[in-house]
Image (cartoon, helix red, strand yellow):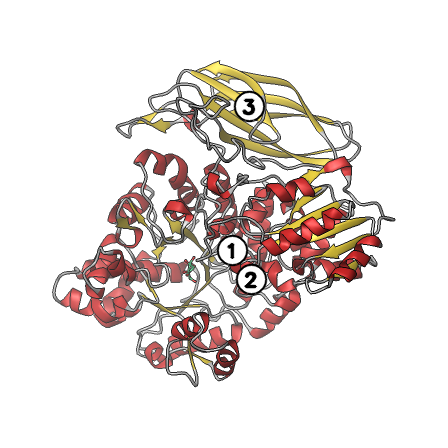
Amino acid sequence: MKKDYESRIQELLSKMTIEEKIGQLQQCGPSLVGAFDVSFDELLNMMFDGRISQEEFGRLMSTAEQDFHEEDLRAGRISSYNGVGDAGTADRLQRIAVEETRLGIPLLFGYDVIHGFRTVTPIPLAESCAWEPELWEKTGRVAAEEATAAGVHMTFAPMVDVAKDARWGRISEGAGEDVLLNSAYGAAKVRGFQGDDLSKENAMAACVKHFAAYGAGEAGRDYNRVDMSPQRLWEEYMPSYQACVDAGARAVMPAFNDINGVPCSVNSWLLRDILRERWGFNGLVISDSNAIAECVIHGIAADRKDAARQAILAGMDMDMASNTYIECLKELVESGEVPESVLDEAAGDVLRIKFELGLFDHPYRTTQKREQETLLRPEYRTIAREAAVKSIVLLKNKDRVLPLKPETKAALFGALAADKGQMTGSWAIGAKEKDCVSMAEACAARGLDWQYCGPDADEAVLQAAAEGADVLIAAVGETKEESGEAASRADITVSEEQMRLIRQLADTGKPVIVVLFNGRPLAIPELHELAAAVVEAWHPGVEAGPAILDILCGDVNPSGKLTTTFPAVTGQCPMYYAHINTGRPGGKSKFTSKYLDAPLEPLYPFGYGLSYTTYAYTGQKVEKKEDGIHVSVAVTNTGGRDGDEIVQCYVQQMTGRRVRPVRQLKDFAKISLKTGETKTVTFVIPYAGLRYYDWEMKETPGEGILKVYVGGDSQAELAGQVVL
Ligand code: GLC
């Protein structure tokens, strides 16, 4: 039963000065100070554009220390910190807030716990390939146990931005291109992070982001414009955020981008009409980093003061890092441009989440002892390994070269086979490289005397290693810097250097097994041709090496399935399965929708993934019933190994008030089947699940002929059809 803090909130507000209310809207991060008289960002830019060398940058950084602006804190001008990730610092700052400010209002500590805190689990795009909400919740719970032990109260996650363009670096941070999967993923993470009682010391508030449609940036370029019909916004993007709000997320972060010309940070339709009025959200709305100030650059605000005015009137409660609120709000309230009632509402939202987290009654939620005892617990590593194994997708396995037999001698090639620091992927700011286990290390730990040939090995060494092995394993893909925020790529292939290695190995005539480490779909047709097997490992987290060997050596039968389409060439982007037919769907004849210089089909379709066994789908049945459309199918394990199969159910409405996608995922089920075993899977698609919007944005029920497809990927065969 959710407690009601409203009277305590109002009582506290009645005691607060305008300055103290504004102070509650300020989140800042520790700034770096040292023997450099420029901001840390400027120092980074100076290093990136070569104005100072890496060595000089390193020397300057060695003088750096964090400045937490304690004087501002004591003066009641700081409400929250971003990026405090250790119990000692959090405790020290909290004691200042509670014991040295006039009203003793506790701090809120926010942190980007995107896929694990210290026990880093696979990047979200990887974990989504497990198609397993129970797993997503479990790893969310582990993240909360560790992060709260380190003093974190709120995580800036889950990120549920549907992403259909593989050029976008942040496709790595969500659950791929499908809105139903992102919805299920986000809701599971909210449950995992928050648990059943936010006031418990091991619960952290979920902050769903980035609201909204950040993944639809034009051309896959980060922060770029988002311009789409309201129909598409509501059918393909908004449901994943709503699923998280419905699951009880207590914070929301508006996106950097605009929607149809109005930046989300100042979009009152989004933050008030929809989020608060229609969805009934009464939690905290916190800006993205510096996003309020950037509304000036967007061209929607005349200056910082105008940006602050628009943002708070639009429903933005807390300012992350732009300082526009702390600088401008007092004047805006005193001039009447911002009613004090609006300020009270924003400050009230901040106080509410602090009450819900129990911070007024128990402001000191953790200790360094609890932190030490919690981080990197062995059982967390076990869960990280389970998540990594389940995230791996087998994309090719010619002549069943995998799993390797115990006597098979392999050789390992490629920098990524030994570069443990890359295994965490992007947004793993609590990670420590030493915690990660690379493939090369895992081989040694497993007693495999597989020779590892580093990237600087010369031709002779490489040839010798190849000669001495039966199979050649090449680890290629992306570094973590090539993925995540501000990492859009205009050419989503592997580097020429890595392709040279693959060709060299293929020229030996021995089977080449490629292990991919990446944070996005890659357009790798030549690699696919040259490899005997392709294993998609993504950026798998701390247990990378052991998990990959579990699959390669056959301890575990791979079960992952893609949650994003892999284009064959970058030029096909954006490429996704739930596309519409057009009047001239791509085909052999000239006047159809296709490219002259690229194939029609993707390299690997959405929902695709191989197994070491095989499955047969029989006895499909599709029936209209009172509560929805009942779909059943018998799935048999027809191969020689037990395995887990992800059964997928898609629909296609053949006609409508607007044209409908050729496929839409409506349900999925992951089942375990012993060899030879058959299980019947039944899905019930509620009629409400078929609703869409007509030209006037009126919600419209499904109508006409509905085809239903059931199988192991988005190219599943027809199971039957009904007339709605
Ligand atoms: C970043 C990201 C956002 C993150 C925030 C705080 O710019 O856009 O996802 O939570 O800053 O670190």
* Separation of marks 3 and 2 at Cα, in angstroms: 39 Å
Assign the C terminus to one quadrant of the image: top left
Q: Residue at x 36, y 59 (%)?
A: 288
Residue 659 x/y as whole percent? 37, 24
What residue is drawn where x is 76% and y is 50%?
Answer: 472
* Residue count near mark 3 (Cα–Cα under 10 Å), binned few <14, some 14–19, many ≥20: many
Q: Is residue 472 left or right of residue 194?
A: right
Disc 1 + disc 2, Cβ < 8 Å: no
Q: Amino acid at mark 3?
A: Tyr
Residue under numbered circle 3: 709
Q: Earlier in the sequence, mark 1 or mark 2?
A: 2
Nearest the eye: 443 or 650: 443
Of the image marks 1 and 3, the number of the one nearer the N terminus:
1
Residue type at tag 1? Ser
Q: Position of residue 73 (x, y in %)?
A: 35, 77
> In the image, what residue type sits under mark 2?
Phe
User: Can you identify the residue that label 2 sits on?
Assistant: 117
Which of the 4 image quadrants contains residue 718?
top right
Residue in front for this viewpoint, 482 or 251: 482
Asked if residue 59 shows in the view, the reply is yes
Point 78% across, 62% down: residue: 461
**Quarter of the render that holds ligand 1:** bottom left
Label 2 crowding class (10 Å Cα cut-off): few <14, some 14-19, many 20+?
A: many
Q: Position of residue 579 (x, y in %)?
A: 44, 31
